[in-house]
Amino acid sequence: MWIKLLVGGLLIAFCVLLGYLASGKYRARAKFFAQFEMFNERYLSELAYQRKPLAEFLAAYEYTGTFQRVVGQCRGRKPPEFAESWLSREERGECADYFSMLGAGDSVSQSGYFAAKKPYLAGKKGESAREARERTALYLKLGLLAGLAFVILIV
Protein backbone atom coordinates (compact mmCIF):
# COMPACT_ATOMS: atom_id res chain seq x y z
CA MET A 1 0.00 0.00 0.00
CA TRP A 2 2.74 2.49 0.97
CA ILE A 3 4.77 1.53 -2.05
CA LYS A 4 1.83 2.34 -4.35
CA LEU A 5 1.42 5.75 -2.70
CA LEU A 6 5.13 6.45 -2.98
CA VAL A 7 5.28 5.39 -6.64
CA GLY A 8 2.11 7.37 -7.37
CA GLY A 9 3.50 10.49 -5.73
CA LEU A 10 6.82 10.18 -7.55
CA LEU A 11 5.02 9.63 -10.86
CA ILE A 12 2.90 12.73 -10.34
CA ALA A 13 5.97 14.77 -9.36
CA PHE A 14 7.83 13.51 -12.44
CA CYS A 15 4.97 14.48 -14.77
CA VAL A 16 4.72 17.95 -13.18
CA LEU A 17 8.49 18.33 -13.64
CA LEU A 18 8.12 17.42 -17.32
CA GLY A 19 5.41 20.07 -17.63
CA TYR A 20 7.70 22.64 -16.02
CA LEU A 21 10.55 21.74 -18.36
CA ALA A 22 8.23 21.88 -21.38
CA SER A 23 7.35 25.49 -20.55
CA GLY A 24 11.02 26.49 -20.31
CA LYS A 25 11.19 28.06 -23.75
CA TYR A 26 8.40 30.49 -22.84
CA ARG A 27 10.18 31.51 -19.65
CA ALA A 28 13.46 31.93 -21.59
CA ARG A 29 11.68 34.13 -24.14
CA ALA A 30 10.18 36.28 -21.37
CA LYS A 31 13.58 36.61 -19.70
CA PHE A 32 15.21 37.53 -23.02
CA PHE A 33 12.77 40.35 -23.75
CA ALA A 34 12.88 41.63 -20.15
CA GLN A 35 16.67 41.91 -20.37
CA PHE A 36 16.40 43.36 -23.89
CA GLU A 37 14.10 46.15 -22.69
CA MET A 38 16.35 46.85 -19.70
CA PHE A 39 19.36 47.00 -22.08
CA ASN A 40 17.52 49.48 -24.30
CA GLU A 41 16.68 51.72 -21.31
CA ARG A 42 20.28 51.66 -20.14
CA TYR A 43 21.58 52.41 -23.62
CA LEU A 44 19.20 55.35 -24.07
CA SER A 45 20.36 56.72 -20.73
CA GLU A 46 23.96 56.18 -21.77
CA LEU A 47 23.44 58.05 -25.04
CA ALA A 48 21.75 60.95 -23.27
CA TYR A 49 24.14 61.44 -20.37
CA GLN A 50 27.42 59.56 -20.10
CA ARG A 51 28.44 58.53 -23.63
CA LYS A 52 30.99 55.86 -22.75
CA PRO A 53 32.53 53.85 -25.58
CA LEU A 54 30.34 50.95 -26.70
CA ALA A 55 32.74 48.23 -25.55
CA GLU A 56 32.91 49.79 -22.09
CA PHE A 57 29.12 50.07 -21.91
CA LEU A 58 28.62 46.44 -22.97
CA ALA A 59 31.07 45.27 -20.32
CA ALA A 60 29.50 47.39 -17.57
CA TYR A 61 26.43 45.20 -16.97
CA GLU A 62 25.90 41.49 -16.46
CA TYR A 63 23.15 39.59 -18.22
CA THR A 64 22.09 35.96 -18.14
CA GLY A 65 21.04 33.29 -20.60
CA THR A 66 20.73 33.96 -24.28
CA PHE A 67 20.97 37.71 -23.89
CA GLN A 68 24.40 37.33 -22.29
CA ARG A 69 25.58 35.42 -25.37
CA VAL A 70 24.19 38.11 -27.68
CA VAL A 71 25.90 40.93 -25.77
CA GLY A 72 29.12 38.91 -25.71
CA GLN A 73 29.00 38.59 -29.49
CA CYS A 74 28.46 42.35 -29.78
CA ARG A 75 31.54 42.92 -27.59
CA GLY A 76 33.53 40.93 -30.10
CA ARG A 77 32.21 43.24 -32.84
CA LYS A 78 30.63 40.39 -34.76
CA PRO A 79 26.93 40.41 -35.59
CA PRO A 80 24.97 38.31 -33.10
CA GLU A 81 23.23 35.16 -34.22
CA PHE A 82 19.65 34.47 -33.19
CA ALA A 83 19.14 30.74 -33.68
CA GLU A 84 16.66 30.30 -30.83
CA SER A 85 13.53 28.42 -31.85
CA TRP A 86 11.38 30.51 -29.53
CA LEU A 87 12.05 33.70 -31.54
CA SER A 88 9.93 34.20 -34.64
CA ARG A 89 11.53 35.19 -37.93
CA GLU A 90 10.24 38.74 -37.50
CA GLU A 91 11.67 38.97 -33.98
CA ARG A 92 15.04 37.66 -35.16
CA GLY A 93 15.08 40.34 -37.84
CA GLU A 94 14.16 43.09 -35.37
CA CYS A 95 16.85 41.93 -32.92
CA ALA A 96 19.49 41.74 -35.67
CA ASP A 97 18.57 45.25 -36.88
CA TYR A 98 18.70 46.56 -33.32
CA PHE A 99 22.16 45.19 -32.58
CA SER A 100 23.50 46.24 -35.98
CA MET A 101 22.63 49.85 -35.06
CA LEU A 102 24.63 49.79 -31.81
CA GLY A 103 27.47 52.26 -32.16
CA ALA A 104 26.53 53.14 -35.76
CA GLY A 105 26.05 56.82 -36.43
CA ASP A 106 25.86 59.81 -34.14
CA SER A 107 24.17 59.88 -30.76
CA VAL A 108 21.15 61.89 -31.99
CA SER A 109 20.21 59.38 -34.69
CA GLN A 110 20.87 56.47 -32.34
CA SER A 111 18.75 58.06 -29.63
CA GLY A 112 15.91 58.48 -32.11
CA TYR A 113 16.18 54.90 -33.34
CA PHE A 114 16.41 53.30 -29.89
CA ALA A 115 13.64 55.53 -28.50
CA ALA A 116 11.43 54.33 -31.37
CA LYS A 117 12.20 50.73 -30.36
CA LYS A 118 11.09 51.37 -26.78
CA PRO A 119 7.33 50.67 -27.32
CA TYR A 120 8.10 47.60 -29.43
CA LEU A 121 10.32 46.13 -26.71
CA ALA A 122 7.84 47.00 -23.96
CA GLY A 123 5.09 45.26 -25.92
CA LYS A 124 7.22 42.19 -26.51
CA LYS A 125 8.21 42.07 -22.85
CA GLY A 126 4.59 42.23 -21.69
CA GLU A 127 3.38 39.76 -24.30
CA SER A 128 6.11 37.23 -23.58
CA ALA A 129 5.68 37.54 -19.79
CA ARG A 130 1.93 36.97 -20.12
CA GLU A 131 2.45 34.02 -22.43
CA ALA A 132 5.08 32.53 -20.08
CA ARG A 133 2.71 32.76 -17.12
CA GLU A 134 -0.15 31.19 -19.08
CA ARG A 135 1.91 28.42 -20.65
CA THR A 136 3.73 27.54 -17.44
CA ALA A 137 0.43 27.22 -15.59
CA LEU A 138 -1.04 25.20 -18.46
CA TYR A 139 1.88 22.78 -18.69
CA LEU A 140 2.03 22.32 -14.92
CA LYS A 141 -1.68 21.47 -14.87
CA LEU A 142 -1.28 19.13 -17.83
CA GLY A 143 1.61 17.43 -16.06
CA LEU A 144 -0.47 17.02 -12.93
CA LEU A 145 -3.38 15.58 -14.89
CA ALA A 146 -1.10 13.22 -16.83
CA GLY A 147 0.46 12.07 -13.56
CA LEU A 148 -2.96 11.44 -12.04
CA ALA A 149 -4.02 9.53 -15.15
CA PHE A 150 -0.93 7.32 -14.91
CA VAL A 151 -1.58 6.72 -11.21
CA ILE A 152 -5.17 5.69 -11.97
CA LEU A 153 -3.96 3.33 -14.68
CA ILE A 154 -1.34 1.78 -12.43
CA VAL A 155 -3.56 1.38 -9.34
Image (spheres, helix red, strand yellow):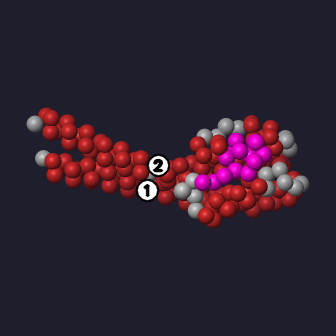
Residue 2 vertical position relative to residue 133 in the rendered view, above or below:
above
Q: Mark 2 = which residue?
A: 24
Q: Mark 1 = which residue?
A: 135
Most extreme residue toward the left is 1
Q: Quadrant of residue 17?
A: top left
Q: Residue at x 43, y 56 (%)?
A: 135
Label 1 crowd (10 A; few <14 / some 14-19 / many >=20): many
> Which element type, helix, strand or loop, lies under badge 2?
helix
How far across and how far down the image is residue 137, in percent? 39, 53
Q: Residue at x 80, y 38 (%)?
A: 56
Q: Which residues are magenta?
A: 70-83
Q: Earlier in the sequence, mark 1 or mark 2?
A: 2
Q: Residue at x 20, y 36 (%)?
A: 6
Is label 1 in contact with label 2 (beta carbons under 8 Å)?
Answer: no
Identified by mark 2, the residue type is Gly
How far across and how far down the image is residue 110, in percent? 83, 56
How far across and how far down the image is residue 63, in percent? 64, 40
Identified by mark 1, the residue type is Arg
